[in-house]
Image (tube, helix red, strand yellow):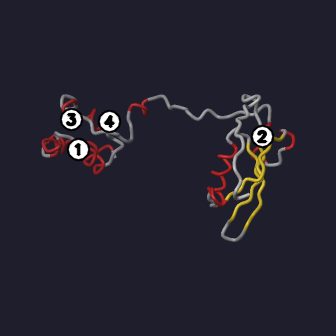
Amino acid sequence: KSTGEIVSLKQIPEESPVKIKYFDIQLRYDSRSGIHNMYREYRDSGAVTQCYRDMRACHRARAHSIQIIKVEVVKAANCKRPQVKQFRDSKIRFPFPNVFIIGIVCHFSMLKSHAPIFFEYFGLNDLYISMKYIFLNKTTFIVMYLFNPFVMYFLHSQYFLNLLQLISLFK
């Protein structure tokens, strides 16, 4: 077995790639306590890859310690695991995860990915700026603006001190 050579290599195309299939995988893996045999089921065309990831996540088994013995397609009625059986329901429904709250809250973000440019806000009144940053505390407000080119002018101005007083009133 150790001195064998590959005689031929042939790719077998999938007969029906859009049909849903259930795969069962029989494997053996080495753990710290010994050698274990295991049976796993997947409803996925990448069942072997998913099996390697599950074994690493759940059992801390690395890929070199896993030996896949057999992979075969099984009928949906022959599935044993509840994680795979739950998808056999014909009336299965999934929640829509991207629900957006529409309203005034959407206009004020809690976190900023970049520091705003100050000269845009100099012409506006203090109330608008304090409402814009009502959710931020004073330290976050100061740290956000440390990377702005106008920071030295802004931090020493009376405008900034008035702004901090207004923000503290709304808390």
* Mark in front: 3 vs 2: 2
- Give how far across and how far down residue 170 sits, in percent: 32, 43
Question: Mark 4 highlights which residue?
Answer: 132
Q: Decide which of tag 1 and tag 2 comes sooner along the chain.
A: 2
Q: Residue at x 74, y 57 (%)?
A: 1
Q: Disc 3 versus disc 1: distance between alpha carbons? A: 12 Å
Q: Nearer the viewer, mark 4 or mark 2?
A: 2
| Residue 124 vs residue 55, the one in the foreground | 55
Q: What residue type is labelled 2?
A: Tyr
- Compared across the picture, whether 50 is left or right of 145 comes to right
N-term-proximal mark, 4 vs 1:
4
Which residue is the extreme one toward the right?
77
Report which residue position mark 3 lands on. Answer: 118
- The numbered mark, 3 or 2, whose residue comes first in the sequence reads 2
- Disc 4/disc 3 C-alpha distance (Å): 13 Å
Alpha carbon separation for disc pair 4 and 2: 53 Å
**Comparing marks 4 and 1, which lies closer to the viewer?**
1
Which secondary structure, mark 2?
A: strand
Find the distance from the CA under tag 4 to the CA under tag 1: 19 Å
- As drawn, the label of residue 22 is 2
Q: In terms of sequence position, does the residue under pointer 3 or pointer 1 come before the other?
A: 3
Residue 4: x and y in percent read 71, 53
Q: Which residue, given by chain and number where applicable, does mark 1 sit on?
A: 147
N-terminal-most mark, 4 or 3: 3
